[in-house]
Image (cartoon, coloured by chain):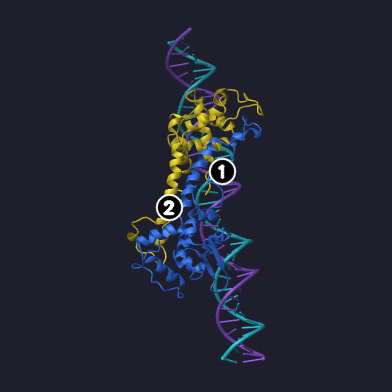
Chain colours: A yellow, B blue, C purple, D cyan
DNA sequence: GGAATATTACTCGGATACTTTCTGTCCGAGTCTACCAGG
DNA sequence: CCTGGTAGACTCGGACAGAAAGTATCCGAGTAATATTCC
């Protein structure tokens, strides 16, 4: 049971876009360059976010992505649901209905007790992820490193791709 | 993010073994027959449970598997950990340390805020699974269908593989 | 000089290969049972 | 009749293919900016 790596990319990218705000769309290549990610694959993940109404995309020159709504209204669960799909981690296959003890399906109206336990655990997991938003983590980062947001914002908006020298001394993006 | 199907098999099988109790080991083929599962693959899952001390195995004729400890001491989390492995669903790749803003790793002593959110959600999920044991679901099933445990127990212990006629009228194993 | 237009270059979007994980299967090592021979 | 030994068959255990999902990539459709031309 492993979560797709694209989820991490998507959350970090949404956080960066939150700092850019409405200053303008940012294209995939620039968003990917922040973390040295493969741009086409990140683009694929961002497409999923667009389909779920988390981002909006603009084609053509000066195009790119931006948040579709305020960071306070984008939860971790929204992003996970967009990337991973709506399916539950534990999907009951109803194996109890198979084999020599399997009665006709009409007898299984009450749900499987085992599936119920997993459903309950997953409900808590989703509740936790739904309670945390992009704005929450943005606030956490700003408390630790107040200069980071503006630095990221400027770098994502400027034209010259080599505006920041790689190496020590730069603020952490997070 | 999908949980292995073997988890469902393992939990159901542990529940069946709980009803058998110490009456004797049950071999893989018989355990698999309850739900029409492929015996070799179920065997593979049960091996993992043995390695983690949840089951004990006996080789040779009249051999098989039995619970290594009382059902009250076997939690859902134990089984999930044995089948799925110890890894977290969300594994932070520390992409924040890559790219033009990546400082030297010494600057990242405090953990990533994003990873912290996922870790917290997963902690709740594990806590829920750890609180539910095989004995708990056994009790639930017995309340709904009191005759099931003894029926399963007898069928798993008897010698003749055709002791139960398939079809309606049989109790549900759960 | 200003505006309409055609061009051009740039962006996203979906369709296409490759790798890793999960699912399913097979055969060998070890062990307990049962039978058989001997006392 | 009882006991020891031996052969046999049965079970688990790990090693071996096939399928599905995840990862990575590429090229085309659409669009907005821009340069050009005409009024």
x and y percent of residue A96 in the render?
A: 41, 61
- What whole-number distance in Å separates the C-alpha atoms at marks 1 and 2? 24 Å
Q: In this view, does D4 lie to the left or right of B70?
A: right
Let me know if residue B41 appears in the view: yes
| Pointer 1 residue | B91
> At numbered mark 1, what does the secondary structure look like: helix, strand or loop?
loop
The residue nearer to you, when weighing A64 against C23, is C23
Q: Residues within 10 Å of mark 1 (few under 14, many from 20)?
A: some
Looking at the rendered image, the disc whose residue lies closer to the viewer, 1 or 2, is: 2
Q: Residues within 10 Å of mark 2 (few under 14, many from 20)?
A: some
Let me know if residue A36 appears in the view: no
Whether pointer 1 and pointer 2 mark residues with C-beta atoms closer than 8 Å, the reply is no
Q: In this view, does A160 lie to the left or right of B167?
A: right
x and y percent of residue A143 in the render?
A: 54, 28
Identify the residue at horizontal 40%, vertical 72% (top origin). B164
x and y percent of residue B88 in the render?
A: 54, 46
| Pointer 2 residue | A117
Q: Mark 2 lies on which chain?
A: A
The residue nearer to you, when weighing C15 against B137, is B137
Identify the residue at horizontal 50%, vertical 32% (top origin). A137
Q: Mark 1 lies on which chain?
A: B
Using the image, determine if residue A98 lies above or below residue D27. Answer: below
**Dividing the picture into quarters, in which one does residue B150 lie?**
bottom left
x and y percent of residue B128 in the render?
A: 46, 49
Q: In this view, does B107 lie to the left or right of B43?
A: right
Using the image, determine if residue C32 lies above or below residue D29. Answer: below
Q: In which quarter of the image is the C terminus of chain B?
A: bottom left
């Amino acid at each position: 049971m492993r979560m797709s790596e694209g989820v991490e990319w998507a959350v970090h990218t949404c956080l960066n876009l939150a700092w850019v705000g409405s200053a303008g769309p940012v294209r995939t290549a620039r968003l990917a360059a922040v973390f040295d990610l493969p741009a086409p694959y990140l683009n694929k993940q961002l497409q999923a976010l667009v389909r779920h109404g988390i981002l909006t995309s603009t084609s053509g020159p000066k195009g790119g992505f931006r948040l579709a709504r305020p960071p306070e209204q984008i939860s971790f669960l929204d992003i996970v649901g967009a990337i991973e799909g709506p399916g539950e981690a534990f999907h009951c296959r109803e194996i109890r209905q198979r084999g020599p003890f399997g009665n006709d399906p009409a007898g299984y109206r009450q749900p499987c007790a085992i599936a119920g336990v997993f459903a309950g655990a997953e409900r808590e997991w989703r509740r936790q992820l739904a309670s945390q938003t992009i704005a929450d983590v943005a606030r956490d980062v700003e408390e630790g490193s107040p200069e980071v947001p503006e630095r990221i914002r400027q770098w994502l908006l400027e034209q010259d791709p080599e505006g920041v020298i790689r190496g020590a001394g730069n603020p952490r993006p997070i």
